[in-house]
Image (tube, helix red, strand yellow):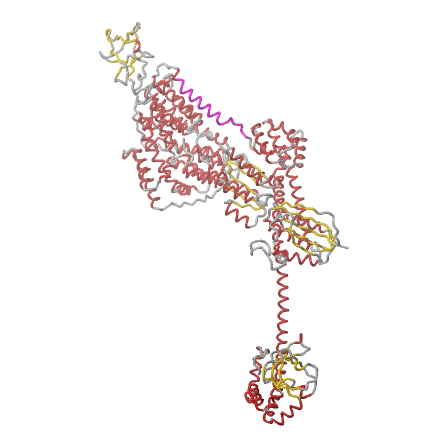
Amino acid sequence: MSKIYILVVEDEPEVLDVVVRDLSSLEETFPIEMAVSVKEAREIIAEIEENGDKLGLAVCDHVMPGEMGVELMIDMQKQPFTERTRKVLLTGQAGLDATVEAVNHARLNRYIAKPWDPEELVKIAIDELTTYVIEHEKNLLPYLGILDAERLNEVIRSRGTVSDH
Amino acid sequence: MSTGNPFESASGAAREIKSSDAFRTRQIYNKKVFVERVREMMSQAPLLMKLRFTADVGQVLIKEGANNNSLYIILDGYVAQLKNSFESNAAIDMQGPGDFLGLLSFHTGEPAFTSARASTKVSGLKVNHHEFDEFNSKYPEISKVLQGLVFSNLSERYRRVVTLHIEVDHLSRQLEEERNQLQLTVIELEKTRNRLINQEKMATLGELTAGLAHEINNPASALLRSVDYLIQKLPEMLQKAAEQTDTSMVRFLFDAGTNRDYSDHITHRELVKKFSEKYPHLSRAQVRAITMMNKETYQRIRKYAESPELNDVLNLLIDSYQAGSFMNSIRLSTSRIENLVKSLKSYSRQSGNKPEETDIRNGIRETLMILGNRLREIEVSVNLPEIPTVMCNIGELNQVWTNIIINACDAMKDKGTMEIECGSEGENVFVKISDNGPGVPDNIKSRIFDSSFTTKTAGGDFGLGIGLAVSKGIVEQHNGEIRVGDAPGGGAQFTIYLPAKN
Amino acid sequence: MKQKKSQRPVWLKTAVGLILGIIGFCIPLFVTFTGLSFAGHITLGIFLMAAVFWMMEPIPIYSTSMLVIFLQVAFLSSQSPLFSEAELPGTEIQMVSEEIWSVPASAIGSGDQVFLRIGPRSSEAVEVEIVQAQNDTVLIRGNFEEGAMIVSDAGHRLTGYTPVGFSVFFGTLASPIIILFLGGFMLAGAAVKYNLDKNLTSVLLKPFGTKPMFIVLGLMLVTAVLSAFMSNTATTAMMMTVAIPIAAQVAKEDGFRIMLALSIPIAANIGGMATPIGTPPNAIVISALNAQGINIAFGTWMILALPLVAVLILAAWGIMRVFFPPKIEKFKLDLTSKFQTSPKALMLYFFFGLTVVLWVTEAQHGVPSSMVAFLPIAGLTVTSIMEKEDIRALPWEVLWLVAGGIALGISMENTGLAVWIVSSISWDVMPQIVLLLVFGLVALFMSNFLSNTVTATLLIPLAVSMGTSGIAGDGFNLIISALLIGMACNMAMLLPISTPPNAIAMSTGFIKTGDMIKVGLVIGFVGIGIALILSLFYWPLLV
């Protein structure tokens, strides 16, 4: 079974550390990849694609040296491999412009302001990953315990993805 | 009234309405009629023909201050009356057909009050005292008309003097009013300008705040979350550590965590892959934590990683490493916030209005720190050798550096290189800020510091686009100078000169 | 931090499964078993392969069923290359003296049998006593008619097996029980589409008040009722959407939380026993009995099963109360029901009600339930209540799974394989009650690790053949043993892998495997016990 990855892009290692730490409850099911720049993020995405795995969620800082987070997200929106990846912008500051751009062009799914509430971050990650697996995975059972079980059960019920045998 | 009189202006029209009543009863003294009569009489009386004179353009008939023995009656052409006291010898009146010249000086024998100079070719009669008497006695009927004309001419002149007075008075009152109005406008303008400058300052501040939010929120997040983690994990860790017979490893890993350096993520990924394959019993979180450690640390923790039985100890060791690394994170984040707050404090220092002796390089450094967020994608090379101090208000100068750097960022669309250097030149120190943006076209170089000049579109950006004008004002207040030129790389180069102290 | 389990790579398991399955298929090709016909050997190969594939799942279980049907069509049908041209060689039996006949030595099959040649492709085994064996003729003692034709080659592939047309194997997919299931699927699909299931749940749960124990009982009863007509899995998923928000508001250490999550799969599994369409094993039981000319009406099944269901629900409820006592005193359920009132929804309610009533009253009006099942099939599509996409979304693979099981059962029966397998043990020494107990326990054990349908598919033909062949003695009741095995298959709820409802409940993370095992064990043994009691004292009254 191909793995569904979470990618965290954040230029400051201390911050990257705590983001990953906060998301680590999801790590056993959704391996976390870390990137300190947009460039590195692109390499990681390419590698994930090469391995035949999937990228379910990208949590991205906006203000970074080199390319900005929103640029990465717009780019991801254009690539078929990452088009359906759930995209979350995590930033201490983004002008309204950047946010509007992200929402319009990158189909940004969520926006989290720094400093964040860890429970809120995990909740959003769970929410977005739930949407992702509902859209992409046939077998939802492995995610019932870690993601939004209520939503997944509703889908199992209405779609009949699991049947008696 | 003479026709074609250059004095016939708007106020002249009003004057004519007032004087026309007086003239209506004396139609006989009409200048036209009088000229026709005189011409008629000239054809009959040879004596009159003898009095005939002509003057070419520019010929002076009467000179101001000289005695005048002739009375001129103009029949054709125009003569300008000039007064020396007026600016550039301006014409104060113009006399045409039917008018008299030198009437007063001729009768009183006093020096002429004004000069008279032919403006066109002039013809008429020129009469001296002797001839005047003769004329009087020989042509009494004409003389009667003449006298009437003389009086009417005099009274007209008198009236005109009076009206002129009134007019001058009126004009000067109007002028006064307009001047007052102008003064008010100037005050108003000054207020507006100050307000605009203030707004510009606020806008810069707004931008700074937005950038600072990011600068502070990042370490604040790391700080907060690290503390959360420690609060949550420490009690359990301590308890577990207490159960260990030998706590030296726990201590070692904690220390290793506090000295952690952040690894290259590409090699880290490869390590993770290798590890997961080698030790399938380890969880992802464990692998991630172990692969972040440096070689020495890893060598010491290795035996715990290899054996599944020691997994609990491994977790404790990893936790203590992470606790150490979060401690380190807290230290780094706190010092970052501290530095930021320090520079912010010194950056915005207003120090009253008193200039003080300053090393302006500090201000530049603080400005760069504060603007760090905006400069993330810009390669800034800073070359600030020792320079003499300057008497200045550092807060205001920081505003100058900020404005010019933000201006450069805008021009470069936040991508490119920027060079900041300083030096001294004679009595002055200078600061050069160059970018590799599109540069300033020559035709607008002269206008770039005008407050009315901006290349920014309305509402599209922070600020009002008067940052450069504000900067110029500030620099000039410090008796300095700001210049714009081309950077060697093709972008814009702003140079600020300030007088060094002594 | 969770411990990562070291797992063998998936491909290894797949490879081992495939290889073992193929070996299983090949064994009867190289080893000849005494007393088993040629076709029986082929069927044994298919049976062994299917059993391995179903147990190890190198391929999905429904595709194993399809493979079974394919192999039957290819090797066992009268149109298969093995049988299409074949004809039984015949010879006239020669009378030597009274009751002594002379036959060619080749006509004597293993186990001292000769085969009467009834037609070119069919024969009948007759046991004889060998009097004297000569070189190429044998003298036997037996009752034959003068001039009767016997098969001259007892080892011929057609002896002991009359090939059936391939449409018999295909036809299993359209067998009455499959159609009955399809009708159930259509009703359940439409109910889900129009949220009838959720709304019914809300309404039905209301009378159960605010006491946690009664809320759990309510959840269990509603789940059982729904799962009697819908798939257990779909019912569990739906009920979980009701239970999860409740559980989320309950303290982590409160037993109420475990009860909420555990009661639903248990009730769904138990509820599945209540009607013929409740779960696929029921279909295997009914079709196996049908093949013997025994018809169990929908309503009859319910009368047979309901006491078991009711007792088990109450038992499970009581067990959980002991194991996971709720701490919370009161819980206010926040349920809203909003029945749709569009013309289509009203039509659906009508069809649903009518079909269920007609099913339950089958014994009164005599219209077979599978005929009634076509009412919703036709009615719901004609009225566009179920559209193309909805029909596509039905669990067709379950129908294929059951059809493969039925098809395998047919060949096991008519090639003599089933009888051959059970006849190797002398069952008649065991009292019937012990026999039933053994069957029940084996079924319970197997279905805890295998698919319930697969367990039923593997066991029921054996039980049926025990009854028909008389191996198990006169007291052996075919219907009761099949029923008992079917019920035992549905009582598997020990492990998360036992049934999909268990897997769903486990995946939600509210319960530990240990909790499930505790309750599952008790239910399993209590269930078998009650079923035995019923099969001794209650079922015999009805069948």
| Left or right: C524, with B47 as reference point | left
Q: Position of residue B408 (x, y in %)?
A: 62, 51
The reply to whether residue C359 is visible in this rendering is yes
On screen, residue C192 versus residue B188, left or right, reads: left
Depth check, front residue: B422 or C9: B422
Q: Is residue B328 above or below residue C93?
A: below
In the image, is C239 to the left or to the right of B33? left
Residue bounds of the magenta highlight: C4-28
| Residue at far left of view | C146
Between C283 and C55, the one lying in front of the other is: C55
Q: Can the viewer see residue C536? A: no
Quarter of the rendering containing residue B390: bottom right
Q: Nearer the viewer, residue C396 or A32?
A: A32
Quadrant where the C terminus of chain B sits is: bottom right
Residue C346, position as x, y percentages in the image: 34, 44
Percent x, y of residue B353: 71, 58
Task: Report the residue at 68% width, 46% height from top.
Answer: B382
Residue depicted at x 66% and y 34% = B256
* Vertical placement of residue C380 versus B143, above or below: above
**Residue B239 in the image: above or below residue B132:** above
Magenta segment main secondary structure:
helix
**Across the whole image, how many numbered discs are drawn on residues?**
0
Residue C18 part of the magenta segment: yes
Q: Residue C87: name its quadrant.
A: top left
Residue C421, magenta (yes or no): no
User: Horizontal and vertical percent for residue B108?
Assistant: 68, 88
Q: Look at the image and tell me in which quarter the N terminus of chain B lies.
A: bottom right
Identity of the residue drawn at 64% across and 92% down: B134
